Image (cartoon, helix red, strand yellow):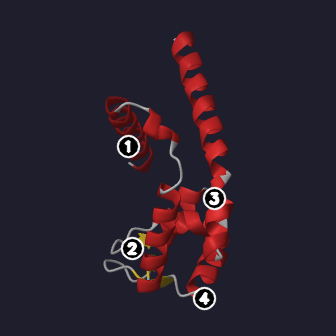
Amino acid sequence: MARTNDEARRAWQLLMRFFFRQRGQLPACGDQFGLSPVQCHVLHLLEPDDPMPMSRLAKTLSCDASNVTGLVDRLETRGLVERRPAAGDRRVRVLGLTPTGSRVRGELLRHVSGRPNPLTRLTPDERRALVRILERLLDEQDG
């Protein structure tokens, strides 16, 4: 059991190191669009035609709902997102991309994906395995 915990801890440390090394690219991408790294992240999280409850966005960003409100205010002022009542419960506010937001999101994703991606050095089987593992872990957290 101790070995399993040590391996899990080591994997976590490596994932965090990998993530933080890649984070350095975000400010440069955001600058091109006049967006902060967090604003870029929000646009990345929002799927076109799939509004997200603001409470889920706060949970995903691991921050207080009041912080999300300020962040969304700035994106809404830029015409990138809009708040609206949820279809099933008008008390719940969802966040959706505007047409401009969808366009900027697409440009941002193309810009980010155009940079050298260290994951391309993995074999196709390794990439598929990594995707399956990360999807499973994220699904378990969302569940």
Residue neighbourhood size for the residue with mark 4, other residues' Cα within 10 Å, grouped as few (<14), some (14–19), many (≥20): few
Q: Toward the viewer: 48 or 90? A: 48
Whether tag 3 and tag 2 are in contact, CB under 8 A, the answer is no
SS of the residue under disc 4: helix
Q: Nearer the viewer, mark 2 or mark 4?
A: 4
Given the image, on which type of amino acid does mark 3 rest?
Leu
**Residue 117 in sight here:** yes
**Distance from Cα at disc 2 to Cα at disc 4:** 18 Å
Q: Is residue 39 left or right of residue 50?
A: right
Marks 3 and 4, how far apart at CA = 21 Å
Q: Which residue is mark 2?
A: 51
Give, as a three-letter code, the residue at label 4: Thr
Instruction: Categorize mark 1 by other alpha carbons within 10 Å: few (<14), some (14-19), many (20+).
Output: few
N-terminal-most mark, 2 or 4: 2
Closer to us: 141 or 77:
77
Q: Which residue is mark 3?
A: 26
**Other-residue count near label 3 (Cα within 10 Å), few / some / many at <14 / 14–19 / ≥20:** some
In this rendering, the label closer to the viewer, 3 or 4? 3
Q: Earlier in the sequence, mark 3 or mark 4?
A: 3
Callout 3 secondary element:
helix
Q: Which mark is residue 20?
A: none
Q: On the image, numbered disc 4 is attached to which residue?
A: 77
Categorize mark 2 by other alpha carbons within 10 Å: few (<14), some (14-19), many (20+): many
Q: Residue at x 59, y 77 (%)?
A: 72
Amino acid, disc 1: Glu
Q: Which residue is mark 1?
A: 135
Chain-order first, disc 3 or disc 1: 3
Residue 3 location, quadrant: top right
Where residue 4 sits: x, y (%)?
51, 16
